[in-house]
Structure formats: structure tokens, C-alpha cells
Image: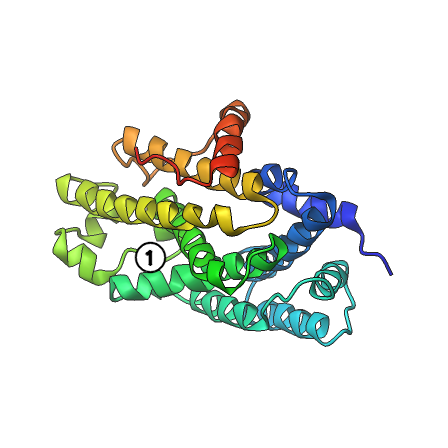
Amino acid sequence: MEPDWKALAGIVRAHSATFYLGSLLFPKEERKGAWAVYAACRLGDEAVDGPGAGREALEAWWQGVERAYGGRPQTAWERGLAWALARWPIPQEAFRHMYEGFLRDLGPVRLGTEAELLTYCYQVAGTVGRMMAPIAGGGPEVEEKAVRLGQAMQLTNILRDVGEDLAQDRVYLPQDLLERFGVSLEELRLGRTGPGYRALMGHLEALARRFYREGLAGLKELKVGQAAIALAALQYQGILDKLRLSGYDNLRRRAHLKPWERLRLLPEALRLSRNGFPATET
């Protein structure tokens, strides 16, 4: 039974303009695979943050992943994922690690170290790189770079959403960095920032940009979808640009790109896909 591609594309478009726009640059079959993987991942995220979210919803999602891998799909997204699994070697381990990251999100979030932060970024986003790499024609040699790109995107999300996450009792800024830069959660909850906070944001921004460079260096090792991946990465880097220009005003505001700003990045994405060079650091 052919998956309901209209429904799966609708999930992608409703939840991520960034990913949807990039996916349109994939060839037709690979675009379907990208939609199937993204829809599966997104619905896992919804099990944590959407209507009816909680441990029971997350367990139901994981059972759906297992059904897809077992060739017993029931729902539209499971059928899409099973369709993709029949065509590309998407590692189930990546979904398992993503599930572990989502489990962390269910409770109050506190991270002790920068290493824990990077592990979390791998779990909820670097895993997506592992899932997408086979669809784009990348072999084992590209996996590490795909993970780096996913970690960079998640770091960007964390920097963008500090205020929103605080309101949900989720602190992704690790304790060791808070102490190193002299940042107090109590002050952040009151909306107060200072030079230490901006230095902390700058530190994580620099790390994200390094990961973008390392990840985008893998474009030349892919067979298809280079422009799609480059465009998604450039859009996320555009969010970092806006954060920096605002002085990291992210406690009450959420940096985002307007549709015309996304489209403006298309020529650079095409250039990157042709030349295989990482984006210039800004």
C-alpha cells in the first residue's frame, strides 16, 4: 500500500518550514524518504510537547517505530517509514537514541556538563543526520559529519529557545558553563542578562558554527540532496545571525526567518551543493 504522501508532506510543512523548503530540492523518491523520516521524528517530538504528550504517548510512538521496522505498520507515518526502510539502510539505533533523548525532555531538564549537552544534541538531532545520510546516498564515511550538522541545528534551537524552555522548566544550558560564565538561572527567570550571559551565548554559537562547517564539509560525499541539506543548514545559520545581532535577546523573543529571507538563501545553497565547500563563517 502506497503511503499517504500528501498527509506526510503536510506534517513536514506544518511543523518545519525550514525542512519542508529544503526537502523540495531532493529528487522525487528521496524527497518522499525525507518526508517519511521527518514525519516519524516530528511525531516523536509531538509525543513530548504536543497535545496529550507524556510517557504514554512517547511509548506509543516508539511502538510505532518498532512496527515499521518489523514490517507491520499501522498508521500513515508508520507506512511512510516502512516504505523508506525498504529502500535505504536507516539505522534503528538512531531512533532508539532519539527515543532516549525524548525521555529526557519529559521531566524537568538539567544538564551538568557541556559533554551532556552535546550528547543530548546528538540524541534528538544528530540522529536525524544518521537517518538522512543513507537517503542522500552517503556511506559510513559521511555519518560523523551528518551527526555534526544535526548537533549544530539543535544547538541553534537551544540558543533560540532559552526563554521558552525556561518557562517549561527545561534548562539546556549546562551547569558547568553557567558557573564558568557567572550566569544565574534566577536572574534569567527574571529576564536579566549581562556580559556573562552574552559570553555564554557566544561560546555556544561558536561551537554551533564549527559544527556547521564540519557537517557541511560532508556535502561532497553525498550523491543527491546536497542543495536541500545546504539550504536547511543555511536557514539555521541565519537564525544564529539574528540572535547575534539582537545581542542574544532570547528570553522574551524567538529569532526566526521570514519566508523571503529563506528564499534569499537558495543561491548560496546551490553554490555549496556544487562546490562542496563549507559555508563561510560569519
Badge 1 marks a residue whose secondary structure is: loop
Disc 1 marks which residue? 172
Q: Nearer the viewer, residue 68 or 52?
A: 68
Q: Can I make out residue 237 in this image?
A: yes
Q: Residue furthest right?
A: 1
Residue 150 percent coordinates (x, y):
45, 53
Residue 100 percent coordinates (x, y):
48, 71
Task: Using the image, determine if residue 62 lies above or below residue 120.
Answer: below
Q: Can I make out residue 254 in this image?
A: no
Residue 145 percent coordinates (x, y):
43, 55
In this picture, residue 7 sits left or right of residue 165: right
Residue positioned 68% across, 50% down in the render: 30
Residue positioned 47% across, 30% down in the render: 257
Q: Nearer the viewer, residue 222 or 73?
A: 222
Q: How is the image coloured?
A: rainbow
Task: Using the image, determine if residue 105 lies above or below residue 181.
Answer: below
Residue positioned 50% across, 62% down in the render: 127
Q: Nearer the viewer, residue 257 or 84?
A: 84
Quarter of the view holding residue 112: bottom left
Amino acid carrying mark 1 in the image: Tyr
Residue positioned 53% across, 44% down in the render: 229
In this picture, residue 264 sits left or right of residue 5: left
